[in-house]
Image: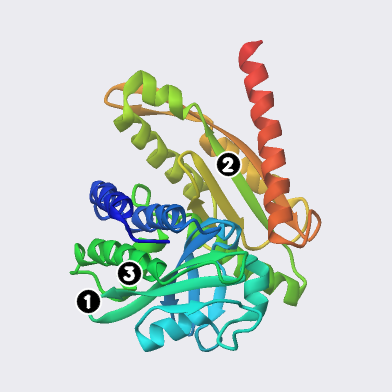
Amino acid sequence: MNLGPETLINIINIQTEVVKLGLDLAGVMDLVVQRAQQLTHADGAVIELAEDDYMVYRAASGTAEKQLGLRLHKETSLSGLCVKVGHALQCSDSEEDPRVDKEACRKVGLRSMVVSPLKYGDILVGAIKVLSSKPNFFDDAVIHVLDLMSELIAASMYNAEKYSSNELVYRATHDQLTGVANRALFYDRLRQRLIQAQRLKDKFSIIILDMDGLKQINDNWGHRAGDAAIQEFTFCIKKATRQTDIVARVGGDEFGIIVNTIKNDDDITIVTQRIENALTQTFKFEGKEIPLHASMGWALFPNDGEELEVLIDKADQRMYTMKRIHKNNRKS
Protein backbone atom coordinates (compact mmCIF):
# COMPACT_ATOMS: atom_id res chain seq x y z
CA MET A 1 0.00 0.00 0.00
CA ASN A 2 1.15 3.60 -0.66
CA LEU A 3 1.14 6.23 2.09
CA GLY A 4 -0.84 8.69 0.03
CA PRO A 5 -2.71 11.91 0.88
CA GLU A 6 -5.89 10.04 1.85
CA THR A 7 -4.03 7.97 4.45
CA LEU A 8 -2.35 11.08 5.88
CA ILE A 9 -5.72 12.87 6.11
CA ASN A 10 -7.17 9.86 7.91
CA ILE A 11 -4.31 9.93 10.42
CA ILE A 12 -4.91 13.65 11.04
CA ASN A 13 -8.60 12.88 11.66
CA ILE A 14 -7.60 10.13 14.08
CA GLN A 15 -5.40 12.65 15.89
CA THR A 16 -8.47 14.84 16.39
CA GLU A 17 -10.37 11.88 17.84
CA VAL A 18 -7.46 11.14 20.18
CA VAL A 19 -7.44 14.72 21.46
CA LYS A 20 -11.15 14.46 22.30
CA LEU A 21 -10.45 11.41 24.45
CA GLY A 22 -8.04 13.43 26.60
CA LEU A 23 -6.32 11.39 29.33
CA ASP A 24 -8.39 8.25 28.69
CA LEU A 25 -5.40 6.14 27.67
CA ALA A 26 -7.43 2.91 27.41
CA GLY A 27 -9.90 4.68 25.12
CA VAL A 28 -7.04 6.03 22.99
CA MET A 29 -5.54 2.57 22.60
CA ASP A 30 -8.90 1.04 21.63
CA LEU A 31 -9.42 3.77 19.04
CA VAL A 32 -5.92 3.42 17.59
CA VAL A 33 -6.08 -0.35 17.08
CA GLN A 34 -9.41 -0.03 15.29
CA ARG A 35 -8.12 2.72 13.01
CA ALA A 36 -4.76 0.99 12.43
CA GLN A 37 -6.59 -2.11 11.26
CA GLN A 38 -8.70 -0.05 8.85
CA LEU A 39 -5.80 1.98 7.45
CA THR A 40 -3.61 -1.06 6.76
CA HIS A 41 -6.47 -3.35 5.62
CA ALA A 42 -5.29 -5.85 8.24
CA ASP A 43 -7.36 -8.65 9.74
CA GLY A 44 -6.61 -7.37 13.23
CA ALA A 45 -4.51 -4.98 15.29
CA VAL A 46 -3.08 -5.16 18.79
CA ILE A 47 -1.39 -2.93 21.34
CA GLU A 48 0.86 -4.89 23.70
CA LEU A 49 2.33 -3.34 26.84
CA ALA A 50 5.60 -4.61 28.27
CA GLU A 51 4.90 -5.81 31.81
CA ASP A 52 7.66 -7.66 33.67
CA ASP A 53 8.69 -10.61 31.47
CA TYR A 54 5.60 -10.45 29.25
CA MET A 55 4.02 -8.58 26.37
CA VAL A 56 0.32 -8.28 27.27
CA TYR A 57 -2.53 -7.66 24.79
CA ARG A 58 -4.11 -4.49 26.27
CA ALA A 59 -6.13 -3.40 23.21
CA ALA A 60 -7.18 -5.53 20.26
CA SER A 61 -9.45 -5.37 17.23
CA GLY A 62 -10.64 -7.64 14.45
CA THR A 63 -9.49 -11.25 14.58
CA ALA A 64 -7.24 -10.45 17.56
CA GLU A 65 -10.07 -9.13 19.74
CA LYS A 66 -10.83 -12.50 21.32
CA GLN A 67 -7.21 -12.73 22.46
CA LEU A 68 -7.46 -9.62 24.67
CA GLY A 69 -5.38 -10.24 27.79
CA LEU A 70 -3.09 -12.75 26.07
CA ARG A 71 0.44 -12.85 27.52
CA LEU A 72 3.52 -13.55 25.40
CA HIS A 73 7.03 -14.02 26.76
CA LYS A 74 9.23 -11.12 25.71
CA GLU A 75 12.12 -13.40 24.81
CA THR A 76 10.15 -15.55 22.37
CA SER A 77 7.85 -13.04 20.64
CA LEU A 78 8.40 -10.58 17.79
CA SER A 79 6.81 -7.78 19.83
CA GLY A 80 9.23 -8.48 22.68
CA LEU A 81 12.13 -8.30 20.23
CA CYS A 82 10.69 -5.07 18.81
CA VAL A 83 10.78 -3.47 22.27
CA LYS A 84 14.31 -4.78 22.78
CA VAL A 85 15.77 -3.41 19.54
CA GLY A 86 13.65 -0.25 19.48
CA HIS A 87 12.52 -0.22 15.86
CA ALA A 88 9.77 -1.69 13.66
CA LEU A 89 9.97 -5.34 12.62
CA GLN A 90 8.16 -7.23 9.88
CA CYS A 91 7.27 -10.92 9.63
CA SER A 92 6.34 -12.16 6.16
CA ASP A 93 5.39 -15.70 7.21
CA SER A 94 5.09 -16.78 10.84
CA GLU A 95 5.53 -20.44 9.90
CA GLU A 96 9.00 -19.68 8.52
CA ASP A 97 10.17 -16.97 10.94
CA PRO A 98 12.29 -18.19 13.90
CA ARG A 99 11.74 -14.91 15.81
CA VAL A 100 8.03 -15.47 16.48
CA ASP A 101 5.97 -17.49 18.95
CA LYS A 102 4.44 -19.90 16.41
CA GLU A 103 1.89 -21.35 18.84
CA ALA A 104 0.59 -17.89 19.72
CA CYS A 105 0.47 -16.93 16.02
CA ARG A 106 -1.65 -19.98 15.26
CA LYS A 107 -3.94 -19.21 18.19
CA VAL A 108 -4.51 -15.67 16.93
CA GLY A 109 -4.73 -16.87 13.33
CA LEU A 110 -1.96 -14.77 11.82
CA ARG A 111 0.63 -15.56 9.15
CA SER A 112 2.17 -12.11 8.63
CA MET A 113 2.52 -9.00 10.77
CA VAL A 114 4.26 -5.68 11.30
CA VAL A 115 5.23 -4.49 14.80
CA SER A 116 6.28 -0.97 15.80
CA PRO A 117 7.54 0.11 19.26
CA LEU A 118 5.63 2.40 21.63
CA LYS A 119 7.70 4.96 23.51
CA TYR A 120 6.89 6.91 26.67
CA GLY A 121 9.60 9.57 26.74
CA ASP A 122 12.80 7.59 26.27
CA ILE A 123 11.29 4.37 27.61
CA LEU A 124 10.00 1.61 25.34
CA VAL A 125 6.73 0.57 26.99
CA GLY A 126 5.13 -1.67 24.38
CA ALA A 127 4.33 -2.24 20.73
CA ILE A 128 1.55 -1.78 18.20
CA LYS A 129 1.00 -4.62 15.76
CA VAL A 130 -1.14 -5.29 12.69
CA LEU A 131 -1.69 -8.82 11.46
CA SER A 132 -3.05 -10.81 8.54
CA SER A 133 -4.09 -14.41 8.05
CA LYS A 134 -2.20 -14.30 4.72
CA PRO A 135 1.58 -14.55 4.34
CA ASN A 136 3.43 -11.64 2.70
CA PHE A 137 0.44 -9.34 3.13
CA PHE A 138 2.12 -6.09 4.24
CA ASP A 139 4.53 -3.80 2.45
CA ASP A 140 7.01 -1.30 3.87
CA ALA A 141 4.48 1.55 3.85
CA VAL A 142 2.65 -0.11 6.73
CA ILE A 143 5.67 0.56 8.94
CA HIS A 144 5.23 4.30 8.37
CA VAL A 145 1.54 4.06 9.27
CA LEU A 146 2.30 2.23 12.51
CA ASP A 147 5.06 4.69 13.39
CA LEU A 148 2.57 7.54 13.06
CA MET A 149 -0.08 5.67 15.07
CA SER A 150 2.42 4.88 17.81
CA GLU A 151 3.23 8.59 18.02
CA LEU A 152 -0.45 9.31 18.69
CA ILE A 153 -0.39 6.96 21.67
CA ALA A 154 2.94 8.38 22.83
CA ALA A 155 1.42 11.88 22.71
CA SER A 156 -1.47 10.67 24.89
CA MET A 157 1.06 9.26 27.36
CA TYR A 158 3.10 12.48 27.22
CA ASN A 159 0.02 14.51 28.19
CA ALA A 160 0.20 12.66 31.50
CA GLU A 161 3.97 12.90 31.86
CA LYS A 162 3.66 13.31 35.65
CA TYR A 163 2.63 9.64 35.84
CA SER A 164 5.21 6.88 36.31
CA SER A 165 5.32 3.99 33.83
CA ASN A 166 3.52 1.79 36.39
CA GLU A 167 0.73 4.36 36.67
CA LEU A 168 0.48 4.46 32.89
CA VAL A 169 -0.21 0.71 32.93
CA TYR A 170 -2.89 1.38 35.57
CA ARG A 171 -4.51 4.01 33.35
CA ALA A 172 -4.41 1.60 30.41
CA THR A 173 -6.15 -1.15 32.37
CA HIS A 174 -8.79 0.69 34.40
CA ASP A 175 -12.03 2.40 33.46
CA GLN A 176 -11.70 6.18 33.71
CA LEU A 177 -15.27 6.83 34.93
CA THR A 178 -15.55 4.15 37.62
CA GLY A 179 -11.97 3.26 38.52
CA VAL A 180 -12.60 -0.48 38.23
CA ALA A 181 -10.83 -2.83 35.81
CA ASN A 182 -11.57 -2.33 32.12
CA ARG A 183 -12.23 -4.93 29.43
CA ALA A 184 -8.53 -5.56 28.79
CA LEU A 185 -7.69 -6.23 32.43
CA PHE A 186 -10.84 -8.34 32.89
CA TYR A 187 -9.77 -10.72 30.13
CA ASP A 188 -6.18 -10.73 31.36
CA ARG A 189 -7.25 -11.75 34.88
CA LEU A 190 -9.77 -14.23 33.49
CA ARG A 191 -7.10 -15.97 31.41
CA GLN A 192 -4.78 -16.15 34.42
CA ARG A 193 -7.53 -17.49 36.71
CA LEU A 194 -8.50 -20.09 34.10
CA ILE A 195 -4.92 -21.38 33.88
CA GLN A 196 -4.71 -21.52 37.67
CA ALA A 197 -8.04 -23.35 38.02
CA GLN A 198 -7.03 -25.91 35.39
CA ARG A 199 -3.79 -26.55 37.27
CA LEU A 200 -5.30 -26.68 40.78
CA LYS A 201 -8.59 -28.27 39.65
CA ASP A 202 -10.65 -25.83 41.71
CA LYS A 203 -13.76 -23.77 40.92
CA PHE A 204 -14.41 -20.16 40.05
CA SER A 205 -17.22 -18.26 38.37
CA ILE A 206 -17.76 -15.32 36.04
CA ILE A 207 -20.78 -13.05 36.13
CA ILE A 208 -21.88 -10.78 33.27
CA LEU A 209 -24.20 -7.89 34.12
CA ASP A 210 -26.02 -5.58 31.75
CA MET A 211 -27.28 -2.32 33.22
CA ASP A 212 -30.96 -2.08 32.25
CA GLY A 213 -32.36 1.33 31.33
CA LEU A 214 -29.19 3.38 30.85
CA LYS A 215 -30.50 4.79 27.55
CA GLN A 216 -33.71 5.92 29.23
CA ILE A 217 -31.73 7.60 32.02
CA ASN A 218 -29.61 9.45 29.45
CA ASP A 219 -32.70 10.42 27.43
CA ASN A 220 -34.76 11.55 30.44
CA TRP A 221 -32.15 13.22 32.65
CA GLY A 222 -29.05 13.69 30.48
CA HIS A 223 -25.64 12.04 30.24
CA ARG A 224 -24.46 13.46 33.57
CA ALA A 225 -27.22 11.45 35.20
CA GLY A 226 -26.22 8.45 33.12
CA ASP A 227 -22.60 8.73 34.29
CA ALA A 228 -23.77 9.07 37.89
CA ALA A 229 -25.93 5.96 37.45
CA ILE A 230 -22.96 3.98 36.11
CA GLN A 231 -20.86 5.08 39.09
CA GLU A 232 -23.60 4.16 41.57
CA PHE A 233 -24.12 0.85 39.79
CA THR A 234 -20.40 0.11 40.15
CA PHE A 235 -20.43 1.06 43.84
CA CYS A 236 -23.34 -1.32 44.48
CA ILE A 237 -21.56 -4.20 42.73
CA LYS A 238 -18.33 -3.61 44.66
CA LYS A 239 -20.27 -3.43 47.93
CA ALA A 240 -21.88 -6.82 47.18
CA THR A 241 -18.64 -8.58 46.19
CA ARG A 242 -15.46 -9.51 48.04
CA GLN A 243 -12.06 -7.84 47.75
CA THR A 244 -10.70 -11.00 46.14
CA ASP A 245 -13.24 -10.74 43.30
CA ILE A 246 -12.48 -8.75 40.13
CA VAL A 247 -15.10 -6.17 39.14
CA ALA A 248 -14.76 -4.70 35.65
CA ARG A 249 -16.61 -2.37 33.31
CA VAL A 250 -16.26 -4.19 30.00
CA GLY A 251 -18.50 -1.93 27.90
CA GLY A 252 -20.73 1.13 28.12
CA ASP A 253 -23.41 -0.50 30.27
CA GLU A 254 -21.87 -3.97 30.63
CA PHE A 255 -19.93 -5.24 33.62
CA GLY A 256 -18.05 -8.43 34.41
CA ILE A 257 -17.12 -10.05 37.70
CA ILE A 258 -14.62 -12.84 38.34
CA VAL A 259 -15.66 -14.65 41.51
CA ASN A 260 -12.29 -16.12 42.35
CA THR A 261 -13.36 -18.57 45.06
CA ILE A 262 -16.31 -20.95 44.76
CA LYS A 263 -16.40 -23.77 47.33
CA ASN A 264 -19.55 -25.49 46.05
CA ASP A 265 -22.04 -25.08 43.21
CA ASP A 266 -24.61 -23.32 45.42
CA ASP A 267 -22.21 -20.47 46.21
CA ILE A 268 -22.87 -18.77 42.88
CA THR A 269 -26.60 -18.52 43.68
CA ILE A 270 -25.76 -16.80 46.96
CA VAL A 271 -23.37 -14.38 45.24
CA THR A 272 -25.77 -13.44 42.43
CA GLN A 273 -28.63 -12.96 44.91
CA ARG A 274 -26.49 -10.63 47.01
CA ILE A 275 -25.62 -8.56 43.92
CA GLU A 276 -29.25 -8.48 42.75
CA ASN A 277 -30.38 -7.25 46.18
CA ALA A 278 -27.74 -4.50 46.12
CA LEU A 279 -28.86 -3.32 42.67
CA THR A 280 -32.64 -3.35 43.27
CA GLN A 281 -32.91 0.23 44.48
CA THR A 282 -33.00 3.86 43.44
CA PHE A 283 -30.39 6.56 43.92
CA LYS A 284 -30.68 10.32 44.13
CA PHE A 285 -29.25 12.59 41.46
CA GLU A 286 -29.87 16.32 41.79
CA GLY A 287 -33.05 15.68 43.74
CA LYS A 288 -34.38 13.02 41.36
CA GLU A 289 -34.99 9.38 42.29
CA ILE A 290 -33.46 7.21 39.54
CA PRO A 291 -33.96 3.44 39.56
CA LEU A 292 -31.16 0.91 39.07
CA HIS A 293 -31.81 -2.48 37.49
CA ALA A 294 -29.60 -5.17 35.99
CA SER A 295 -29.82 -8.35 33.96
CA MET A 296 -27.28 -10.90 35.09
CA GLY A 297 -25.86 -14.19 33.83
CA TRP A 298 -23.17 -16.45 35.18
CA ALA A 299 -21.00 -19.42 34.31
CA LEU A 300 -19.17 -21.82 36.61
CA PHE A 301 -15.82 -23.45 35.89
CA PRO A 302 -15.60 -26.36 35.18
CA ASN A 303 -19.33 -27.22 35.19
CA ASP A 304 -20.27 -24.90 32.32
CA GLY A 305 -17.06 -25.26 30.35
CA GLU A 306 -13.29 -25.25 30.57
CA GLU A 307 -12.48 -22.69 27.85
CA LEU A 308 -12.72 -18.92 28.12
CA GLU A 309 -15.01 -18.42 25.12
CA VAL A 310 -17.38 -21.18 26.28
CA LEU A 311 -17.70 -19.66 29.76
CA ILE A 312 -18.32 -16.16 28.39
CA ASP A 313 -20.96 -17.47 25.95
CA LYS A 314 -22.75 -19.38 28.72
CA ALA A 315 -22.84 -16.32 30.99
CA ASP A 316 -24.05 -14.14 28.09
CA GLN A 317 -26.84 -16.62 27.27
CA ARG A 318 -28.09 -16.56 30.86
CA MET A 319 -27.86 -12.77 30.98
CA TYR A 320 -29.89 -12.33 27.77
CA THR A 321 -32.49 -14.80 29.04
CA MET A 322 -32.91 -12.68 32.17
CA LYS A 323 -33.08 -9.51 30.07
CA ARG A 324 -35.95 -10.97 28.01
CA ILE A 325 -37.80 -11.90 31.21
CA HIS A 326 -37.38 -8.37 32.57
CA LYS A 327 -38.59 -6.87 29.29
CA ASN A 328 -41.68 -9.10 29.22
CA ASN A 329 -42.46 -8.32 32.86
CA ARG A 330 -42.38 -4.58 32.16
CA LYS A 331 -44.85 -5.06 29.29
CA SER A 332 -47.32 -7.05 31.39
Looking at the rendered structure, the kind of residue marked 1 is Gly
Q: Classify mark 1: residues with Cα within 10 Å, few (<14), some (14-19) or many (20+).
A: few
Q: Nearer the viewer, residue 260 or 10?
A: 10
Read off the residue under disc 1.
121
Tell which tag, 1 or 2, sits nearer the viewer.
Answer: 1
Q: Residue 151: where, in percent of width, then height? A: 27, 66
Whether residues under marks 1 and 3 lie with C-beta atoms below 8 angstroms apart, the answer is no
Q: CA distance from mark 1 to mark 3?
A: 15 Å
- If you read the primary sequence from the N terminus, does the residue marked by circle 1 or circle 2 appear first? 1
On the question of residue 7 being in view, the answer is: yes
Whether residues under marks 3 and 2 lie with C-beta atoms below 8 angstroms apart, the answer is no
Looking at the rendered structure, the kind of residue marked 2 is Leu
Read off the residue under disc 3.
147
Q: Residue 145: where, in percent of width, then height? A: 35, 64
Q: Nearer the viewer, residue 235 or 94?
A: 94
Looking at the rendered structure, the kind of residue marked 3 is Asp
Q: Which mark is residue 285?
A: none
Picture layout, residue 326 above or below residue 147:
above
Tell which tag, 3 or 2, sits nearer the viewer.
Answer: 3
